[in-house]
Each structure stands twice: as C-alpha cells, then as structure tokens.
Amino acid sequence: MRATSPPVPLTTLDPASATEAWALDRAASPDAWSLPVWREELGRGDRRYLGVHTDRLIGLAGWADLAGEAHLMSVVVADRERRRGLGARLVAGVLADAAAHGASAVTLEVRRSNTAARALYRRAGFVDAGVRPRYYADGEDAVVLWRR
Ligand SMILES: CC(C)(COP(=O)(O)OP(=O)(O)OC[C@H]1O[C@@H](n2cnc3c(N)ncnc32)[C@H](O)[C@@H]1OP(=O)(O)O)[C@@H](O)C(=O)NCCC(=O)NCCS
C-alpha cells in the first residue's frame, strides 16, 4: 500500500515549533538538544527543518548548508509512529530540499550502534565512509556516511 499512497506532506519548521521539536527529540535521542538550541536551530538561515504533523509534530529532519554540501542534522520519528515509512519520507524530503538548494552531496554522523538509523540511511543511498572514534559524549564512535 505504501508505494501507491500519496506521499505524506512535509512542512517547513520555524521557531514556533521549537517546543514540539525539543519534546520529540528528547523522547527519542540520547543526544537531544536543549530547548534554547532548538529555538536557535529552527531560526537559522543556514538550516532547514522539515516536519510531519498529525494533531502534533510526529517526525522531523533537518539539514545544514556547509559550503554547498548538506549535513543531515537530525532525523526523529515519534516512537509509536515508527516503521511506517515516515523516516524514509523525511530523509527523501531532506535530500530533495538540499538538491533544490544546490547541495551536491550529503553527509551525516550516526552512532555505530544505531542499527535502525543506519539501515534507513543505507536504503536512502548513503554509504559508510569512515569512523570518528569516541565522537559522542559517552564515548561511542560515530560512523560517517556520504551520499553523492
Ligand atoms: C531512525 C528512525 C528515524 C527511523 O524512522 P522510521 O519512521 O521508523 O523509519 P521507516 O519506517 O521509514 O523505515 C525505513 C527503513 O529503515 C530501516 N529501519 C527503520 N527502523 C528500523 C529498525 N528498528 N530496525 C531495522 N531497520 C530499520 C528499514 O530498512 C526500513 O524499511 P522497512 O520498514 O521497509 O523494513 C527512528 O527509528 C527514530 O526516530 N529513531 C530515534 C532517533 C534516531 O536515532 N535518529 C537518527 C539519528 S542519526
């Protein structure tokens, strides 16, 4: 059914969504940003965040423009909404948005142990390109991925 359904609409997030974005992020990620950081992120001109809404924000993804290359900053889907294509939809939305803004390649870091996200990114065409040892505050390595 997923292949024939119309794509879930994505909206561009601004600082008015900071509280919802923060709540979604902190429920899902050990590396969640604080509310002030979310307010700043959603207001920056060199970042773009896309969201999926029902009666509330249930997913988001964003990217940063780094001199013509896109850095995928975060992808989060609410726990109860997972495994129905929203993460893939958000990543596809970011890739399209970045390409529309002239980004020729997209990179990201992901925890080595994050098998769900690594599978999602692999399916979206990312390939492993290296490791940043002890990148995260708790000492876990980051895997660096690129999609060109
Ligand atoms: C990673 C995350 C965004 C995936 O969101 P999602 O909406 O469940 O992803 P999708 O339903 O679009 O899944 C797309 C594909 O990714 C892979 N995938 C997603 N979750 C997976 C899991 N738990 N285990 C294995 N593969 C998984 C599968 O290949 C899946 O395709 P399939 O369902 O047809 O098998 C979600 O698990 C999440 O929010 N995790 C916490 C935050 C996080 O770690 N973000 C990444 C930080 S870099």
Image: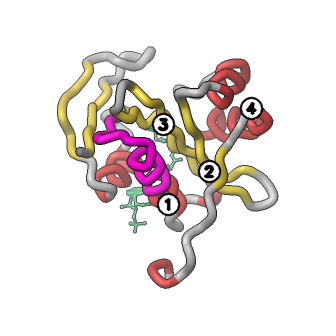
Residue 95 is situated, as x and y percent measured from the top left of the image, at 41, 50
- Mark 1–mark 2 Cα distance, whole angstroms, equals 10 Å
Tell me the quarter of the picture where residue 130 sits. Answer: top left
- Residue occupying image coordinates x 26% and y 39%: 146
- Quick one: 39 or 115, which is closer to the camera? 39
Magenta residues (range): 91-107
User: Mark 2 = which residue?
Assistant: 59
The quadrant in which the C terminus is found is top left
User: Mark 4 = which residue?
Assistant: 15
The amino acid on which the numbered mark 2 sits, given as a three-letter code, is Gly
Report how many numbered discs are placed on residues in the image. 4
Residue 81 is situated, as x and y percent measured from the top left of the image, at 62, 60
- Mark 1–mark 4 Cα distance, whole angstroms, equals 22 Å
- Mark 3–mark 2 Cα distance, whole angstroms, equals 14 Å
Q: Marks 3 and 1: in contact by CB < 8 Å?
A: no
User: Mark 1 = which residue?
Assistant: 89
Q: How crowded is mark 1: few (under 14 residues within 10 Å), some or many (20 or more)?
A: some
The mark found on residue 63 in the picture is 3
The amino acid on which the numbered mark 4 sits, given as a three-letter code, is Pro
Ligand 1 within 8 Å of the CB at mark 1: yes
Q: Which of marks 1 and 2 is nearer the N terminus?
A: 2
The amino acid on which the numbered mark 1 sits, given as a three-letter code, is Arg
- Residue occupying image coordinates x 55% and y 71%: 7
Q: Choose mark 1 or mark 4, whichever is in front.
A: 4
46 vs 97: above or below: above
- Quick one: 62 or 45, which is closer to the camera? 45
Residue 105 among magenta residues: yes
User: Secondary structure beneath disc 2?
Assistant: strand
